[in-house]
Image (cartoon, coloured by chain):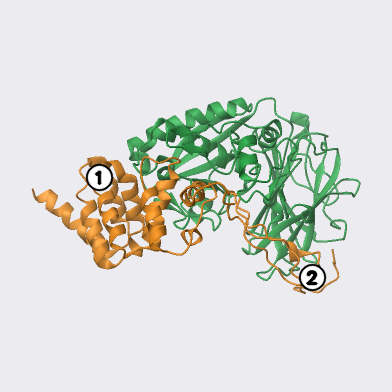
Chain colours: A green, B orange
């Protein structure tokens, strides 16, 4: 691990001399395309394996936005920013500008019928944006990208002078693709032998599913002091944020409980598409063992398969994948190799075995295995910063 | 984007007005923070009902969704809905979320219905429907105090030791004083034997 500092206008490279890889940083100063926002502080820099990490802080300008400068020193790889408002207010990503000043992505193009990233939605005090997302997105080039973020109040009016903490991540395309996950048992469930045995079996099957996409899972387990009825991550969890503050390897926590968000009884829920890598109230995934086990509360072979697919599906969201079609059949992901079908019959025919399909397809005799990813879906998952 | 407005000046068309909130990791789209001209297009999460499906099939499909459904979205709490949900609260049905959600919606939508409470009483005492029994325990706060105690007492009669232990721990954490007292009294009684 190396650390360093930065002066305004000078690219800061994290241990570039040691690893010969790209570097990230902020040129600070005048801000972005519209002169929005200001870098007010640059923090430390670290490495997590091949991932280079730097923190910085800034403030929104008069228009309520800050164009965060992201310096890419070496072409290729992927970057991610996790931008958080310490005051708990709302923030979202709005634009990505290339080093040439072109608008590469605008939120206005991606809040309708096609889903590219949650970053464009005003959800919370954290916004997570990564680039490139799809196979078809242009490779990173050396130079200064800028990511425009906006701070708004509860009435969605822009707010000037708002402090924002940013963590920048960059990594090259990895030779090995390993994702670390932590199974977090809530409410003493780690002592429930039947539940633990089912989770072990489900994880083993999940490892097979992700291996087909070229991703190796490194799984460990822990406990968390939380009620068995888990909170919805739409609202978030203070306990999860506190736990994740102690995780230093970009692992994805998955909290196992009886049920989730008592009003909808979800199988599972991810904290974002993609999810944060900084400690936040949404830094993880929650999963209901009971909704996967069913009315008898015992895991059949079908239930184990569904459990495995739920792990893979929800973590798939966390890694950046959308449903190929939403359950209204009127909105879709942004990928080119998932068809934009428009009714249940066509969608089930085309994608019933797809891991990210919005619902399981079952008869009384069993369910269709939903374990397939398209090449582009696999690409999205592989580009997640935590797959390293 | 207008960068010249004063702090907190309301943005209008083409800026934040279209932005939607709430696309969570389960893919749910909630509504926009519509201000100004209100030009955003809502994308509702309500599942389409297949034209060829029966009402029971459509209900089962709604209960299958990974995004989840609210019980209120299933329709007015009529006897027909109750009966349909009771038929779906069958532990053998797949996907497993269907019976779990059906049981939850029965308790939420029909908390005083004798047929529902009779079913719930059976779920908490039968190992083959113990998963639904756990749903009942998670929903006790929706029920009247008398029913809470009655169902808690029934749950403590669960013959399967592993399930009985699960029920006891959840009842102790229910935050319902009378229910907690019931469990504690049984534990004291057990130690005295």
- Which labelled disc corresponds to residue A65? none
| Residue B12 numbered mark, or none | 2
Label 1 vs label 2: CA separation? 59 Å
Residue A227 in view of the camera = no
Residue under label 1: B126
Report the residue at 63% width, 56% height from top: B29
**A271, A35: nearer the viewer:** A271
Residue displayed at 32% across by 60% down: B140
- The quadrant holding residue A72 is top right
Q: Position of residue B188 (x, y in %)?
A: 15, 54
Q: Residue furthest right?
A: A100
Q: Are marks 1 and 2 on the same chain?
A: yes
Mark 1 or 2, which is nearer the eye?
A: 1
As displayed, is residue B171 above or below residue A11? Answer: below
Q: Residue at x 70, y 62 (%)?
A: A163
**Left or right: where does residue B170 sit relative to residue A293?**
left
- Check the picture and name the quadrant holding the C terminus of chain A: top right
Image check: B53 left or right of B157?
Answer: right
Q: Of A159 and A19, which appears nearest the observer?
A: A159
In x, y percent, where is residue B117?
A: 28, 59
| Total marks in image | 2
Assign a secondary structure to mark 2.
loop
Classify B108 as above or below A354.
below
| Element class at badge 1 | loop
List the single residue furthest toward the left: B193
Q: Quadrant of residue B77?
A: bottom left
Percent coordinates x, y for residue B157 in the rendering? 19, 49
Crowding near the residue tagged with mark 1, few <14, some 14–19, many ≥20 C-alpha atoms within 10 Å: some
Q: Which of pointers 1 and 2 lies earlier in the amino acid sequence?
A: 2
Q: Is residue A4 left or right of residue A196?
A: right
């Amino acid at each position: 691990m190396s650390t360093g500092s930065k002066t305004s206008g000078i690219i800061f490279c994290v241990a570039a001399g040691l690893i010969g890889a790209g570097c990230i940083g902020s040129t600070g100063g005048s801000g972005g395309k519209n002169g929005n926002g200001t870098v007010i502080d640059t923090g430390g820099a670290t490495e997590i394996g091949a991932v280079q990490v730097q923190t910085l802080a800034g403030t929104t300008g008069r228009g309520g936005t800050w164009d965060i400068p992201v310096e890419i020193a070496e072409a290729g790889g992927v970057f991610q920013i996790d931008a958080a408002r310490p005051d708990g207010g709302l923030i979202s990503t709005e634009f990505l500008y290339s080093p040439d000043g072109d608008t590469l992505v605008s939120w206005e193009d991606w809040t309708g019928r096609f889903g590219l990233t949650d970053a464009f939605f005003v959800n919370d005090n954290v916004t997570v944006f990564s680039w490139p997302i799809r196979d078809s997105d242009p490779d990173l080039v050396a130079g200064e990208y800028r990511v425009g973020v906006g701070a708004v109040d509860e009435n969605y009016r822009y707010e000037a002078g708002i402090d924002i903490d940013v963590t920048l991540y960059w990594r090259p395309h990895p030779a090995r693709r390993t994702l670390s996950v932590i199974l977090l048992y809530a409410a003493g469930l780690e002592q429930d032998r039947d539940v633990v045995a089912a989770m072990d079996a489900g994880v083993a099957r999940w490892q097979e599913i992700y291996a087909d996409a070229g991703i190796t899972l490194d799984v460990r387990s822990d406990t968390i002091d939380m009620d068995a009825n888990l909170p919805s991550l739409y609202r978030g969890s203070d306990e999860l944020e506190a736990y994740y503050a102690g995780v230093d390897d970009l692992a994805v926590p998955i909290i196992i409980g009886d049920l989730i968000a008592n009003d909808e009884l979800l199988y599972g829920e991810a904290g974002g598409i993609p999810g944060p890598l900084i400690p936040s109230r949404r830094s993880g995934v929650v999963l209901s063992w009971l909704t996967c086990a069913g009315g008898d509360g015992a895991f059949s072979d079908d239930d184990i398969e569904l459990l495995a697919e739920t792990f893979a599906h929800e973590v798939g969201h966390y890694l950046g994948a959308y449903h190929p079609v939403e359950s209204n059949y009127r909105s879709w992901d942004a990928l080119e190799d998932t068809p934009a079908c428009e009714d249940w019959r066509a969608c089930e025919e085309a994608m019933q075995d797809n891991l990210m399909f919005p619902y399981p397809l079952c008869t009384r005799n069993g369910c269709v295995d939903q374990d397939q990813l398209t090449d582009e879906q696999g690409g999205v998952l592989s580009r997640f910063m935590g797959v390293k | 984007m207008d960068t010249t407005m004063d702090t907190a000046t309301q943005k209008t068309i083409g800026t934040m007005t279209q932005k939607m909130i709430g696309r969570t990791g389960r893919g749910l789209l909630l509504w926009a923070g519509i201000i100004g001209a209100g030009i955003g297009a809502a994308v509702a999460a309500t599942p389409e009902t297949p034209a060829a499906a029966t009402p029971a099939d459509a209900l089962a499909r709604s209960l299958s969704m990974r995004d989840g459904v609210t019980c209120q979205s299933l329709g007015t709490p009529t006897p027909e809905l109750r009966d349909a949900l009771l038929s779906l609260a069958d532990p053998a049905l797949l996907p497993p979320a269907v019976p779990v959600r059906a049981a939850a919606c029965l308790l939420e939508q029909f908390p005083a219905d004798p047929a529902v409470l009779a079913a719930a009483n059976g779920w908490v005492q039968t190992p083959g429907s113990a998963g639904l029994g756990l749903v009942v325990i998670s929903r006790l706060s929706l029920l009247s105090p008398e029913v809470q105690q009655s169902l808690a007492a029934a749950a403590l009669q669960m013959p399967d030791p592993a399930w009985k232990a699960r029920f006891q721990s959840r009842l102790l954490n229910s935050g319902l004083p009378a229910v907690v007292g019931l469990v504690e009294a049984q534990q004291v009684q057990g130690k005295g034997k």
